[in-house]
Amino acid sequence: MKPKPLRGTVSVPGDKSISHRALIFSTLLEGTTEVKNCSQAVDCQSTAECLSALGIGITEETSALGMAKNVSVHSEGLSSLKMSSVPLFAGNSGTTIRLLSGLLAGRPFESVLDGDNSLRKRPMKRVTEPLATMGAGIEYLAVAGSGNNGETRPQTPGYAPFSIRGGKLTGQNFYLKVASAQVETAILLAGLQAEGTTTVNLPSAVRDHTRRMFEHLHVPFSQTGDRTMSVKRLTTPPKAKPIYVPADMSSAAFFMVAACLVEASDLLLTDVGMNPGRLLALEVLQSMGAAISIENPRHFGLEPVADLRIKYAGRLKGTSISAKEIARGIDEIPILALAGALCQGEFAVSGAEELRHKESDRLEAITENLQAAGAEILVKQDGFVIQGKSSLAGGSRWKTHEDHRLAMTGLIANLVCQDKLAIEETESVKISYPGFAVDLAHLCQ
């Protein structure tokens, strides 16, 4: 049976990366910041709950449809942050734990940061080591009841849980080995509380949400090209002003791929964030021959947005994604791999080893799932090469490892496989897009 085409209009939830920053950067300001269309992802809820535990006033307003959400954040500047009486639980969110680490590195109290079992496996030294160099006290903690037979697990250097004792910070000049917007932002947040100048140099350009939001909120900084940012101590909190969050490109990518793969699809995605550092999925699909038009370009604050119309235009062509491009859309590689599995020719990805350190080993998981569904894939340490096929047999088990990106990719794969997949679970989708299955079903009616 042919899959039903995707038809209609959908506005995916607010951008997760921007929502995290909007919530956290609001603590730098004086007054009440209105964050419009804040993501309702569980990850962003984790950030809001951590800020509330730190004494920041958070008020949430859910829309009539229960999706788009406005959040009010009240702060009088960094001095509003108070020591939490409980550990700060970041859940599954790497952005939450890493950005909060930078924010708390200069506060005159101790904070404990932790996350779920998945987050406890993700490396934190890339953030904690620079913060320690600046003068923050970092201690990795043991985990009660998580070892064999329920005994206490010894502390694991470089991983959560850990404590940060904010200290007198000194600005430094950092040259990052990995192009990471999270690490860059964490260091800059610490730099706003440090003596002297703090500079972060990136090996390649990344999404520049932090620069745009600093400029929008009048947080002082300087910039050299698109790879170097510097800050000094923030002595006076800027006045609060509204922040408008565009729709999330990473979430939109799943529907974009689906419309490219399902015959007769005609889909309109509204208010999608068009940050130059987030366009990998769009540009890769266009290079594969997808019919995607950019309509009504405009700005939400300093973030570019547009509506995207995607029409089915026949089978996609093969392409390659290089290491230089990966940072502009690493989270979209799993769903793009599905597009590659059904292309004409070869679809190759290199320089994506960072995917092995996400909520799961996404490189291993996506290639194993696609192979089980009938795809022909050569797996490499930092990527893969797919020989595209005209169809996928399916009928296999799709393992998600409780990773939202893998679960969402599985739901799209289910549309195009000849036999239905046995998807391990879909509860994890709530981490980034609680209404994903509902929106997908609506578009396929």
Image: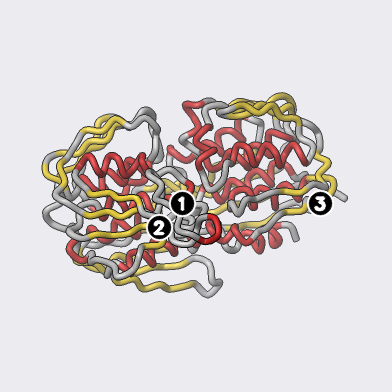
* Residue type, numbered disc 3: Lys
* Mark closer to the chain start, 3 or 1: 1
- Density class for disc 1 (Cα within 10 Å; few <14, some 14-19, many ≥20) is many
> For residue 188, what is the image quadrant?
top left
Colouring style: secondary structure
Is the residue 322 above or below the residue 354 in the image?
Answer: above
* Residue type, numbered disc 2: Asp
Q: Would residue 154 be found to the left or right of residue 326 on screen? A: left
Mark 1: secondary structure: helix
> Dot 2 corresponds to which residue?
114
Task: Identify the residue at image location x=63%, y=42%.
Answer: 335
> Dot 3 corresponds to which residue?
420
- Density class for disc 3 (Cα within 10 Å; few <14, some 14-19, many ≥20) is some
Question: Mark 1–mark 2 contact, CB under 8 Å?
Answer: yes
Q: Would residue 253 be found to the left or right of residue 342 on screen? A: left
Alpha carbons under labels 2 and 3: distance apart = 37 Å
* Residue type, numbered disc 1: Arg
Picture mark count: 3
